[in-house]
Amino acid sequence: MVLLGFFDDHGLSYRKKKALESDREYDLLGMEQAAKEAKIPEIENKKILERSVKYGLEAAPSIGDRTISTFTREPRPAYAGIPTFLRAPFLEDVRKVGEYDVAFMGVPFDIGTTYRAGARFGPEAIRRISKLYTSYSYEKGVDLVESLNMCDVGDVFTIANIEKSFDQIFKAVSHVFAQGTLPVMLGGDHAIGYPCLKAIADNVDGKVGIIHMDRHLDLQEKDMDERMHTTPWFHATNIPNAPPENLVQVGIGGWQVPREAVQNVRKFNTTAISIMDIERLGIEKVAEIALEKAWKGAKAVYLSVDIDSFDAGFVPGTGWPEPGGFTPREGLKFLDLIAREGICGLEVVEVSPPYDISDKTALLATRIIADVLASMVDAGKLGKKFS
């Protein structure tokens, strides 16, 4: 008999899920998802349109749709407006961040890169391409605007010094998290993982687990004599309440994994799951293992997504592209399963717009964030769920 561990206590087993599928009202998920939309109100979206007309002036008399304003203050049209992430309101006074469920923050930092720089422009690119999205997900049956109170607090003021920038990032994330708001970081290179995790661990009374999607281990002590984007989890797992046995790294493989980092997997007793494991075991089993390891004895789990965990053909705009990673469908499925158990923070890193093509790397980063939030809402872990 296979012991399902984490899911025995915290979720549905795969077999139970399959049994429930037989009770579906619809044969097609597409029809089930369409029916789910009818239960979602449109209260907050209507308020946005009303505010836009109020503050942006009524449209010219020739405009038939009177929800259109003269100056746009709402998500329409996609090509206009000042880009915040998913058009969330910009919060100028960050002292009020505790009034929100979720706060998006840019971390424009790339002096921790060891080859192709450019991730400092990642937050800008992600915000800009996020204008393509509405707040409603057909698959999830969730409208983020109706379910969550979200804001964009802008960018952390990073300095041209790695350690001083770490201090700034630590203070920013700590401030948001300590107010009871979920911090979502738009990176930035992966060096930010250490100060982000440190900020959360400093505010959690208990252990914090880490689920890290990447092609690389990022588990060295130093790189070129500094704490770079190859080193965050070495230092994060030296934090007393973020022990290495609660670090799970998923998608590892290829020709860019330093042997020092591999040696530290054995030395620290972390869990490394390769792409070959994913092929052999499947996404659901790998997610089960990752959740069990990360949550073992932990009060919270932090989610770190390096965009290069996806196959290089899908994410050209990154510093260390590596073929053979997740397909978007695989990666998004894995993230859905992880997010449904709840997370304490999310970072998406290593989007490097100078190398991107048609913004598709930045778009996948947007999709990751939106999907993770929607999965948490749908699972009842965050915000309001309508059923």
Image (cartoon, rainbow, N blue to C red):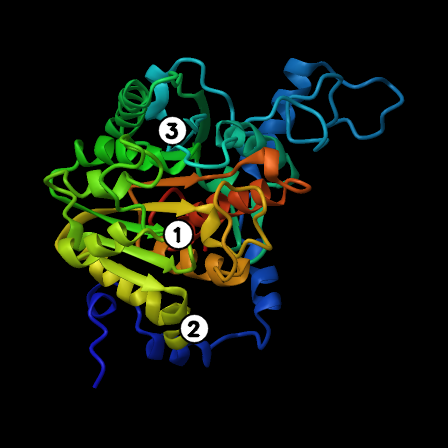
Disc marking residue 279: 2
Q: Nearer the viewer, mark 2 or mark 3?
A: 2
Quadrant including the C terminus: bottom left
The location of residue 292, given as percent across then percent down, is: 22, 62
Instruction: Name the quadrant containing residue 176.
Output: top left
At label 1, counting other C-alpha atoms closer than 10 Å, the crowd grade (few under 14, some 14-19, many 20 or more) is many
**Along the polypeptide, which appears first: circle 2 or circle 3?**
3
In the displayed structure, does residue 74 sit left or right of residue 265? right
> In this picture, is 356 found above or below 83?
below
The location of residue 157, given as percent across then percent down, is: 40, 16
Label 3 secondary element: loop
Give the residue pinned by disc 1.
214
Alpha carbon of mark 2 to alpha carbon of mark 1: how far?
16 Å
Q: Residue at x 80, y 30 (%)?
A: 65
Circles 3 and 1, Cβ within 8 Å, touching? The answer is no
In the displayed structure, does residue 276 sit left or right of residue 197? right
- The amino acid pointed to by label 2 is Glu
Give the residue pinned by disc 3.
100
- The amino acid pointed to by label 1 is Asp
